[in-house]
Image (cartoon, grey):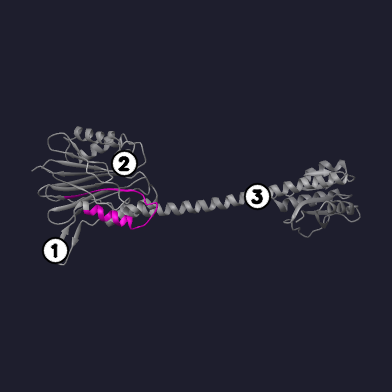
């Protein structure tokens, strides 16, 4: 489709020659009466050519009016006028001026150059509009993600226990420091019957998205530690709890499901009998009433990877014994290297004389002073009070 030239000229100025040259060069020419009032449709126009003739003041006023109507739109304007009118033409908004007597090749070359500039400006404008639309869409998407993250945060906050139960000699304390809006850590302690308490600690690994936070909520709600029948109930062993949660995560069928790490424990608050199972979390640290702290490295891979059973450790917490369980966020770099457990062991040994919650707070301060990552920090403590 040929480019369109808007040819504005007063009658009887020889504009027929201009029209003939432009038409011969392949341009479509739309005629316009110089100084006429009706609005011009500039959309199809590639170049506007104004034959100022003997009416330069009218040509100048029309050029200024067109520039005002076009605003930031780029439409090249070429004046055909005597050399002495060049300053007035440029001041009025013309982009170039050619003398009235000009070689047809020079006229056509100038108009083609201006048409290319118009086409290039149109492409840039279209890309700018597209970028602006994409930017608007991105802002809306980010705002939606922020709303989803805020919703996930509120749901998770409502599920985090504000007070942990105390039964017989068993005491629980927790230090929780969320490092992102969505977060990934979760924990709870549940009283199961007169003597038994179930507890768990979890971490959705490597994500700060709203989806990661919701996966944590899903895993937390999937924890069943007590099955109630018509006339009796059964306490579910920690290894079986992890197996069931793992199968529910796998049942989601998501290709990009984040890894979930958990530790689950079942404690008899009267006797101190403990069952503990682990899936991906750092090893728990046993702090006996006397003797050095020891890491309990129960085998167990991350949840949501494969359908597999989980082993559990059976032990007894004597009066005065403590147990510390932390998420990946308790490691200095979120890295499961040997230094991570060694640091927790050293801190537990250093503060073992502190009573109750002061012990957990002191250990948490030690670990937090070395943390250099944005992961959530959760440290859960279990203690059997000495009689």
Which quarter of the rendering shows the C terminus?
Answer: top left
Bounds of the magenta span? 240-266
Viewer-proximal residue, 125 or 235? 235
Q: Is residue 72 among what the camera can see?
A: no
Reading the chain from its start, which is encountered first: label 3 or label 2? 3
Q: Residues within 10 Å of mark 2 (few under 14, many from 20)?
A: many
Residue 276: x and y, percent? 19, 47
Farthest bottom residue?
A: 230
Q: Give the residue at x 12% y 38%.
A: 289
Viewer-proximal residue, 354 or 3? 3
Residue, disc 2 = 329
Indicate which disc residue 232 carries: 1
Element at label 3: helix
Viewer-proximal residue, 78 or 323? 323
Residue, disc 3 = 125
Q: Residues within 10 Å of mark 3 (few under 14, many from 20)?
A: some
Viewer-proximal residue, 342 or 213? 342
* Distance in Å between CA atoms under marks 3 and 1: 74 Å
Reading the chain from its start, which is encountered first: label 3 or label 1? 3
Q: Is residue 263 magenta?
A: yes
Q: Is residue 287 above or below residue 6?
A: above
Q: How many marks?
A: 3
């Amino acid at each position: 489709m040929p480019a369109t030239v808007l040819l504005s000229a007063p009658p009887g100025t020889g504009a027929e020659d201009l029209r003939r040259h432009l038409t011969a060069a392949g341009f479509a020419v739309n005629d316009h009466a110089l100084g006429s009032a009706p609005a011009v449709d500039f959309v199809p126009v590639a170049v506007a050519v104004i034959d100022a003739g003997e009416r330069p003041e009218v040509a100048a006023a029309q050029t200024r009016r067109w520039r005002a109507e076009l605003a930031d739109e780029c439409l090249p304007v070429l004046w055909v006028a005597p050399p002495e009118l060049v300053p007035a033409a440029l001041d009025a908004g013309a982009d170039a001026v050619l003398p009235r007597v000009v070689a047809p090749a020079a006229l056509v070359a100038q108009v083609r150059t201006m048409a290319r500039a118009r086409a290039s400006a149109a492409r840039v404008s279209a890309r700018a509009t597209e970028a602006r639309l994409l930017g608007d869409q991105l802002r809306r998407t980010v705002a939606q993600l922020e709303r989803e993250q805020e919703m996930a945060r509120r749901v998770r906050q409502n599920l985090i226990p504000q007070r942990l139960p105390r039964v017989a000699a068993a005491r629980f304390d927790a230090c929780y420091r969320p490092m992102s809006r969505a977060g990934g850590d979760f924990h709870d302690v549940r009283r199961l019957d007169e003597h038994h308490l179930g507890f768990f600690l979890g971490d959705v690994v490597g994500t700060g998205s709203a989806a990661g936070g919701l996966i944590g909520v899903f895993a937390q709600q999937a924890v069943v530690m007590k099955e109630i029948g018509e006339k009796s109930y059964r306490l579910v062993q920690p290894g079986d709890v992890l197996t069931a949660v793992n199968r529910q995560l796998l049942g989601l069928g998501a290709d990009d499901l984040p890894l979930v790490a958990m530790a689950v424990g079942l404690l008899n608050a009267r006797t101190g009998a403990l069952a503990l199972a682990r899936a991906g979390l750092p090893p728990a640290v046993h702090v006996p009433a006397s003797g050095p702290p020891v890491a309990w490295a129960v085998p167990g891979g991350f949840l949501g990877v494969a359908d597999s059973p989980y082993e559990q450790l059976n032990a007894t917490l004597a009066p005065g014994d403590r147990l510390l369980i932390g998420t990946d966020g308790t490691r200095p770099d979120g890295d499961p290297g040997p230094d991570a457990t060694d640091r927790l062991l050293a801190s537990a040994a250093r503060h073992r004389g502190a009573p109750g919650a002061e012990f957990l707070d002191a250990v948490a301060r030690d670990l937090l002073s070395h943390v250099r990552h944005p992961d959530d920090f959760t440290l859960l403590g279990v203690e059997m009070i000495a009689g």
